[in-house]
Amino acid sequence: MTSEKTCNSSLLETLNRAFTDAGISDDEIARKADLSSSAVRLIREGKRKLPINAVSKLAVIARLDVAYLMRVALEEYLPGLLEQIEELIGGTLLSNAEKKLIESFRFIGRDYDAMPVIIDRESILAIVTTGDAK
């Protein structure tokens, strides 16, 4: 039998890093997520696929943003599905950080025509106000 991984590394790495950083044991994860300890171990080793219906519980246990982790899971398990859902409902699944960015953008632009400018795609996002007051 091979040790072939069935869980994509980005989701797995995100969860494992969060659990390790928070010092949460596999037994504690299993108890809080209503999973067996062996299932948690296999999921964390990448030998068993994380059930999509457990993503929200595990995000809360790992102290991660639920929307962010669900987006990562959907992108890895069902590429393209999230975009179809967002198109159908006319919205985007946002993480708390993304919501805060939008709220800040709206606050800064309340009296001006605010224009987002990406200075360096990997590290800095600036909101520059331009134009006359409304």
Image (tube, rainbow, N blue to C red):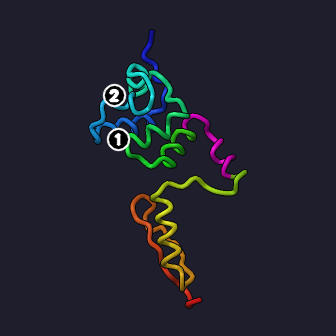
Compare residues 50 and 2 and report the one nearer the observer.
50
Query: Principal SS element in the magenta part?
Result: helix
* Disc number for residue 18: 1
* Disc number for residue 133: none
Between the residue at mark 2 and the residue at mark 1, the CA separation in whole angstroms equals 12 Å
Part of the protein shown in magenta? 76-86
| Residue density around tag 1, few if under 14, some if 14–19, many if 20 or more, within 10 Å | some
Amino acid found under the numbered disc labelled 1: Ala
Left/right placement of residue 42 relative to residue 95 reads left
Q: Secondary structure at mark 1?
A: helix
Amino acid found under the numbered disc labelled 2: Asp
In the image, residue 99 above or below residue 12: below
Q: Earlier in the sequence, mark 2 or mark 1?
A: 1
Q: x%, y% of residue 32?
A: 40, 33
Q: Residue at x 39, y 40 (%)?
A: 61
Q: Residue at x 42, y 34 (%)?
A: 12
